[in-house]
Image: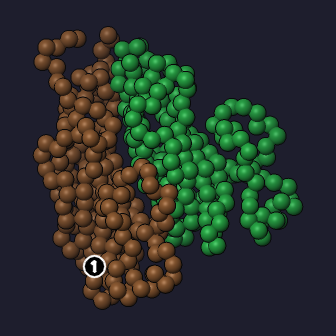
Chain colours: A brown, B green
Amino acid sequence: MGDSTSPSSFTILATGQIECAQIPNCTNAYLKFQFVAGEDWQLLDGLEEGITQAARVPEGRDGVLVWNFPIDITYKTTNAFGWPQLVVAVYGLDMFGRDVIKGYGCMHLPMSAGRYDLNLRLFRPRSASVLQSFTSWMTGMPAEFADPKFPSYGEGREVTRVQSGGQVKVQINLITKDMDMFGYVDGSGRDPAMATQM
Amino acid sequence: MAELHVIGQIAGAIGFPSQNLFCKWGVTAGRSWELLEGLDAGQTQLDLAPDGEPVVWSHPLDLHYACRGLAGWPKIYFQVWSQDIHGRNDICGYGFCHVPTSPGHYELDCPTWIPEGTLGERIAAFFLGGNPRLKYEEVVYTPGDRFRLNTVASGVVQLRLGVMVKDFERNHVTFG
């Protein structure tokens, strides 16, 4: 099985779109997204962060905000730890026309090749007191996370109080290359590693 | 040496008596498993969900284990706690779930339970809070002596997991 040109890394390619969102009491919003990956991961191609257009819910229809924003990203890595996560932050307009946070969401990219419909449920920080929630409503500055990557962290979450509501639908197509050479079996059933006997 | 990657999230919970919940979680594995990278215990955010909707934690899990023996396949265990309007925390559910032994994508629903006290204790807990709690929390995930424990079912914790393995087939392990 020794191949003199065996690859030193494997690659994943994710394409798709941030399709739409459904958020209660929100008729006008845009979304900021970011990909967060571990230290062993190297971005080969594509944009790691971006902003969609501002979308509005059409009159007389179910409250769906459609962005249809393309995602195209390629990563190279030697280690599956730190698998990329998609972190989104949806900002909408309050009644005075100011940008306020409507929700954050986070999900790992799929781990095996295929086509997926991901549903990211949104949550946003709660104000610490009634007075703070009133002043944040008046000034149009509700509580936000200081670090936009915070929803992707596994620690430090125990001190956050949030409320949830709304969801974002993302479609992702995932391709992997050279994962089987590394010996990874991802359960897609297409792994040559599973079929051969060592 | 065989390796196991568990990558996903503790998505949320549904069916609990309260909609203001957080979860303390941990992963336990046998002696022949070594955690190479990742956090194997933690606590999620405290989320208040609207009625009828699942509580959202979206807590990322990224674990990288090295495996020298199959016994003691990793298990994830949970303690779901609720916070009332006065800021008191009370236990709402204990549960555990094995990491699936076959690589792939999973949406798991883990049922939970809480210990049930006597009638007097339940009446007191209704007014003052303070559900009975387990003294030895390993009871949740070890097949030890639960004989004298009376429990009542609680809600369901939802997990979204991806399991990936490396070099297991070299050791002639089949997953099915």
The answer to which of B104 and A138 lies nearer the viewer is A138
> Callout 1, which amino acid?
Asp
Q: Which residue is rendered at x = 27% and y = 86% of the image? A: A97
**For mark 1, does the 10 Å Cα neighbourhood hold few (<14), some (14 to 19), or many (20 or more) residues?**
some
Quarter location, residue B52: bottom right
x and y percentages locating residue A163 in the rendered image:
47, 69
Residue marked by disc 1: A99
x and y percentages locating residue A180 in the rendered image:
26, 25
Number of marks drawn: 1
Q: Is residue A27 visible?
A: no
B96 with respect to A43 (left or right): right
B145 in relation to B167, above or below: below
B97 in relation to B103, above or below: below
Give the quarter of the figure containing the C terminus of chain B: top left
x and y percentages locating residue B68 in the rendered image:
46, 18
x and y percentages locating residue B43 in the rendered image:
52, 52
Quarter location, residue A25: bottom left
Q: Is residue A150 visible?
A: yes
Label 1: which secondary element: strand
Q: Which residue is rendered at x = 12% and y = 46% of the image? A: A45
Q: Which residue is rendered at x = 20% and y = 29% of the image? A: A9
Chain ID for label 1?
A
A159 with respect to A25 (left or right): right
A96 with respect to A156 (left or right): left
Q: Which residue is rendered at x = 79% and y = 43% of the image? A: B149
Give the quarter of the figure containing the N terminus of chain B: top left
